[in-house]
Amino acid sequence: MKKLESSLTNMVLVLTLVAVIMGGILAFVNHLTEGPINAQKEKALADGIKTVMVCEDLTVANTVEVKQNDEKGKEITFTVYEVKDAQGQDLGAAVESTTGGFGGDLKVLVGFDPEGTILGYTLLEHAETPGLGAKADKWFQKGEKGDIIGKSPAEPLTVSKDGGQVDAITASTITSRAFLKAVNNAYNAYKATPAE
């Protein structure tokens, strides 16, 4: 077999062929993992809804997209999952809300009863500093220092440093503000959800 001549054209052809083959392999692997990743996200969301609604036996009766503008005029989309129990009684809704935290986006799922009282919450995604901002997953839970469970954001929740009633995460006020903003926005989206 004759050795390929070392010319610019041959090098470009070989490099292009290698790039095409590697791109094909990456696309194939992406295709293989896409289904399981989406299934895992759906399971995490379903488990999150049960957690924030504090009920195991429930069904999502309706999913509504609510669009609202933030204080800068940027349109934000919220997903509202209207929930009913096994007997068909309205339990309220779980609302997905995203805001910018210290390290990136902070995506929260908040459960509200029909009156708008917070039943529970869970962090779906965050890029906060481990050991500091990442504490938001526990800090605001029932019985913890920044407990928001059982409160209504009809009067927006704010950190005590800003004259509010919620203790901020120690050394992580920016994340605390972002988290409470996500909760307040989720409440507003829930209240703006059109009635069936």
Image (cartoon, rainbow, N blue to C red):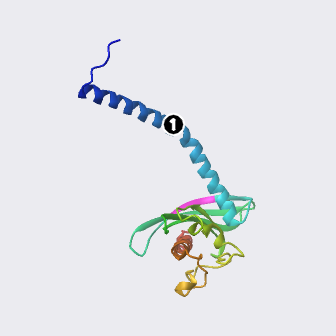
Residue 17 vertical placement versus 1 (above, below)? below
| Residue 43 in view (yes/no) | yes
Query: In the depicted view, which residue is nearer to us: 147 or 19?
Result: 19
Instruction: Tell me if 71 is positioned left or right of 184 in this view.
Output: left
Query: In the depicted view, which residue is nearer to us: 135 or 119?
Result: 135
Query: In the depicted view, which residue is nearer to us: 56 or 29?
Result: 29
At numbered mark 1, what does the secondary structure look like: helix, strand or loop? helix
Main SS of the magenta segment?
strand
Query: In the depicted view, which residue is nearer to us: 134 or 54?
Result: 134
Q: Magenta region: which residues? A: 61-65
Instruction: Tell me if 76 is positioned left or right of 10 in this view.
Output: right
Q: Residue at x 64, y 59 (%)?
A: 61
Horizontal and vertical percent for residue 27?
Answer: 46, 37
Horizontal and vertical percent for residue 35?
Answer: 57, 42
Crowdedness near tag 1: few (<14), some (14–19) or many (≥20) residues, C-alpha within 10 Å: few
Q: Is residue 10 magenta?
A: no
Q: Label 1, on which residue?
A: 29
Horizontal and vertical percent for residue 71?
Answer: 42, 76
Q: Quadrant of residue 157?
A: bottom right
